[in-house]
Structures are given as C-alpha cells and as structure tokens.
Amino acid sequence: MKRLFGGGLLLTVLFICLGLLLFGGAQAISFDTFTAESMTNSADHRIFWLLKIPRLLLVLTVGGALAMVGGTYQILFNNSLADPYILGVSSSVTLGLVVAEIFLGWPSNSIKAMGIGLGFALIVILLLLFCFYFHKLQNMERVVLFGVGINFLFSSALFILISLQNHTLGSGSMRWLFGNIPWIELKESFALIAITAPIGIIIVIFGRYLDGLSLGDTVARTLGFNPNHVRGFYLVLTSLLLTSVTCLTGSIGFIGLVVPHCVRLVFAPRSSRVLLLISFVFGALFLAVSDTISRSILPPLEFPIGMVTTLLGGPLFLYLLWKR
Amino acid sequence: MFLLSFTKLLVLCSIIIGASPLEASQKVPKIITTSPTLTELIFQLGYGKTLVATSEFSDYPKEAKSLPTIGSLFYPSLEKIVRFSPDYVLVDSESTPHTLVTQLNKVKLASISIHLRSVEELFTSSKTLLQEIFHAQHLTILEEKTKQLQSNTKIFSKNFRFLIVAWISPLTLFGNSTFLSDLISKYGGQNLLNSNLQAAYPQVSLEWFVKNPPDILFLLTNQKENLDELQRLAQKWWPNQKVNLVALSPDYFARPTFTPLEHISAILKDAL
C-alpha cells in the first residue's frame, strides 16, 4: 500500500512536471493561446505546436526507449551495471554516425548514416557475444568489463575525430558527447514513434523469455529455450532501438542505468514485462523533466541534456540505494 | 634630414612590398603563434616572416600553410615549441589552455597572451605587438585601419536588432562578448542576446529564439544548403515578420582579425 502510494505520488509529481514542460520552459505559454481566436497566428501558438509538442513527443520516446534498453541489458547480462552507455554500444552508434557525417558527408539523421551507426553497434554486440561465448568461464562480469573497455576505446576515437575537425565552430559536434534534443517537425516525431514503438512492443511481448533469462541460463534451458539465441535476438532488437534514438540525440547517459534500478527499488515488479513498461514510462518522464530543467535554469541558455540527466539522476540513485 | 627621409621611405617600401618592416640592424624575432587567428594577424601587420611555427588550421594567407605546426590547436605541444627556440610565443586566450602560459614560463620562454573579443582589443593587441615585439616606430597601419572603420561606421545611422547563428543544431549563437558581435554593434546593431551573458557561443533555447525575431539574422556558413535550411525554418517560425537572412563566409568572418573589418560594410549595406 505504501509502495503504491509512493509510486502514485511520484507519478503525480512527474505529470505536473510534464505540464510545466508544455506550458513552462524557456518561454512560458498561457492557456489563452488555445482560446482566443486571434492567437492562432501568434508566436506562442507556433511555439506550442511547432516546437513544444514535437519536442515533447521526441523526448518521451527517447527517454522511454533508453530506459527500456537499459532494463533489457541488465537482464540479458545479469549485471546491474549493464547499460548501453557503459557497455560501449551507445558510443559505437555515435562513432558510426560521426564517421558517416565527417568522412561521408551524410547527415546523422539520414537512413544511410543510421545504417553505419547500426553497423558499428552490431560490431560491438558481436564482440560482446564473442567474448561471452568463447570465454572459458562465460563470466558476465568479464563481459561487462570487456564492454567498459570498448566504451573507453570508442569514446576516445570519437573525441579524437571531433577534435580533428576544423575548430572554428565545432560546437555542433559536441552534441555527440553530451547529448542534445534537436528541433524536429511533428511528422518526424511520429516517424520516430513509428520506428520505435513496434520494437518496444516486440521486446515486451517476448518478455517471458527475459524472465527465464533473469533466473539464469540453466533455468532458461529447462524452460525450453536456448538462452544464447534469446540473448542474440534481444541484442539486435535493442541495437535497432538504440540507433534510432541516438542518431537524433547523441549519447544521453544514465537513463538506461538509473531508471530501471529506481523502478526495481520503488515498485519491485514481478516480471520483466512490468519492469520494462514502468521503466519506459519513468524514463520518458525523467527525460522530459530533465529537458525542461535544461531550458529553464538560465533562459535563454540551454544546457546539454546529458549533463542534466546525470546531475538529476545521480543523487536520486544514490538516495534510493542509501534508503534500501 | 635626407638620410632620415630615405630610411622612412625604405620602411614604407618594405611595408608595401610585404616584407617585414624591421630595420636591417634590428634582430628579427622568432615568433610562434598558437592559433590561426594570430597567424593571420601577424601577416596583416606585415611581420609574417618572423613566424617560425604556428598551430594547425593556420591556412591564411597561403604562406601560413607552409609553416611548421606545434601540434593540435587546443593542445599545442610544449616540446615542439621549445624545439623552435622562439623569442616570443603569442598565446590566443580563446583557444589555448591557460596552463600553456605557466608551462612556457617554467621553460623560460617569453609569451604574450592575446585577447581578441572586441574591436578595441584587436587594435590594442595589435599596438602591443607592434611596439613591444617588433619595436615599430610608426603605427601607420593601425591609424589607417581606425580611419577606415570610422568612415565606414559613419554611413550607418539606422539601428537594427541582430542575432548571429554559429550552428543551427544545436542552436548556437554568438554572444555579446565576441568580436563579430562587437563589430556589428559598431554599425548600429544590437545583439538580442542578453548582454549580461558572458558565454561567447551559448546554446540557446529555440523557443526564446522564435519569440525574439531579429531584423537581421546572420549565419556563419559557406554552404548554401545551410542558408536554405535556415530560410525554410525562418519562414515557418516567423511567417508574418520580415527577417533578413544574411550569410557570413567563415573565410572572412570566423577570425577576429582585420579581415572582417574590410568586408562587413558591404554586407551590411546590402542587408539594410
């Protein structure tokens, strides 16, 4: 009962924040925007429909997807530190996109560049799987450490590539390092939802396999499925999901790591499906709140979203760990 | 009297033909610059031949391309600098880590930190360089530039509001504390960004941007696609307002030297 009350309170607070995102932010919008006929052509009206709504949809999708991918990784690798950011999958996607942008001149949101990003992600996943299958101990901790190594390697390569660019105004490239919520049109927001929603649904539908994996490979085999096949299937699916959001926003850290943990600590979900669904909701709201804060601290300045997620999520995570 | 005039004539000729206007008896200092901006500035002051090395990306004028480099722009190599045994290292405060000056002091190399965030700083820094390093007797070149700037700015009486876009996504603007913003302000422009903001190139919220349409929106770009993209967005964001969109070529406007001073008048005449 106490848990339900806590969760309800948290949800209420987050929805209030969501309202603030739509009507607050760098430029507050009044409700008159929707009532007065003369306002339909006003700047506020355009800000609401052209900027705030598409941005909100983008932020909710990206936040939810990152949290869902993080939750899935933690089950797949049976390790609480497993997260696309820590395992180097995020940095590999980003590196692929930057390579496509710098060397091939393909915009990062183009299908071709996304293909390169996905290719880089799959290489890392194959390396992780290779490490897992061919390591004598099949020790998950070693796999995670291997991923951490890859992350350092790819992040350094990314940093070198960005610093080698003409310095004059290289600030645009920095979005890859700290994350950025770009301006997209409403149709693009819907396109992103159309890509990510089916993947998310598949992940949840086949959630019972994740339940089996969370009990260990031996139990999974007794349940009648090959854990390695399931792991491969989910890694490819989550890579697709990750690539589709990272090509727009760059690397946004911490959500994939912190949100599923917080959900476990607060709600203690009994199945992977529930965990992933709640993680999606809270990941979406968490990123939406972070985005509002990034634009409201010192308007008109906007801070990189990755910094805000880390600043917000870090203390929250530590507090929850301390309490438990 | 005749000898003095003849010497002056020699100095003048040497400026005209582009050679270093240093007297024959005077020791030619060996200079290293840590940014393309300072390299360009030294060439503009007529002392390009004193440069023994520079940073990466120093590509203007074309003679600068053949100079050896001291490593990356943001992280110059102290070892390489020491190897050239320069008399002076000119440190660009905008792009070079502050620690470099301390390191140079430790290895007993003279350095001068140059700030170029405004037109005034360009002139005062140039004066310092001419007097302290090159021991120039005359500051003719600076006097001419000052007169030229004054006569150019007098023509413009109209006040206008402007913003300078450095990068479209993420939306990054030129702050008030940048050379380019200061230069345009001299022509009657008012940067719409809050003047209390100290950030040189702040990333700003698109909502604020849409709510505050400028009279002239500058975009630092060489690529037509970027300008077309901004044009398309401007029509969406400000359908009822006339926002004059002007491209500024990075070849002329990216570096705070005398080059932007020579080209801004023509650009503003067309825009206004």
Image: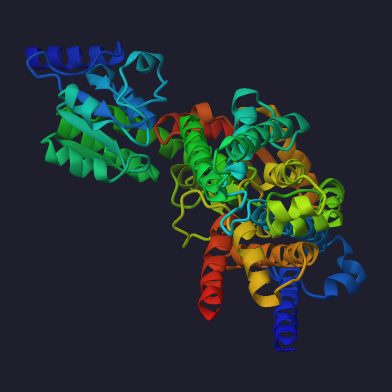
Residue A220's place in the image compared with B75, above or below, is below
User: Closest to the observer: A54 or A96?
Assistant: A96
Classify the position of the C terminus of chain A by image quarter.
bottom right
Name the side, left or right, on which B192 lies relative to B130: right
* Residue at x 71%, y 31% (from the top left corner): A113
Residue B104's place in the image compared with B17, above or below, is below
Residue B245's place in the image compared with A17, above or below, is above
x%, y% of residue A8?
75, 82
Name the side, left or right, on which B257 lies relative to A183: left
x%, y% of residue A64?
74, 59
Q: How many marks?
A: 0
Classify the position of the N terminus of chain A by image quarter.
bottom right
Say which quarter of the image contains residue A310.
bottom right
Residue furthest to the bottom in view is: A1
Residue furthest to the front in view is: A222
x%, y% of residue A7?
72, 80
x%, y% of residue A12?
75, 80
* Residue at x 75%, y 84% (from the top left corner): A4
Query: Visible in this render: residue B165?
Result: no
User: Closest to the observer: A74 or A140?
Assistant: A140
* Residue at x 66%, y 55% (from the top left corner): A70
User: Closest to the observer: B165 or A163?
Assistant: A163
Query: Visible in this render: residue B12?
Result: yes
Say which quarter of the image contains residue A10.
bottom right
User: Closest to the observer: A46 or B248?
Assistant: A46
The way the protein has been coloured in the rendering is rainbow
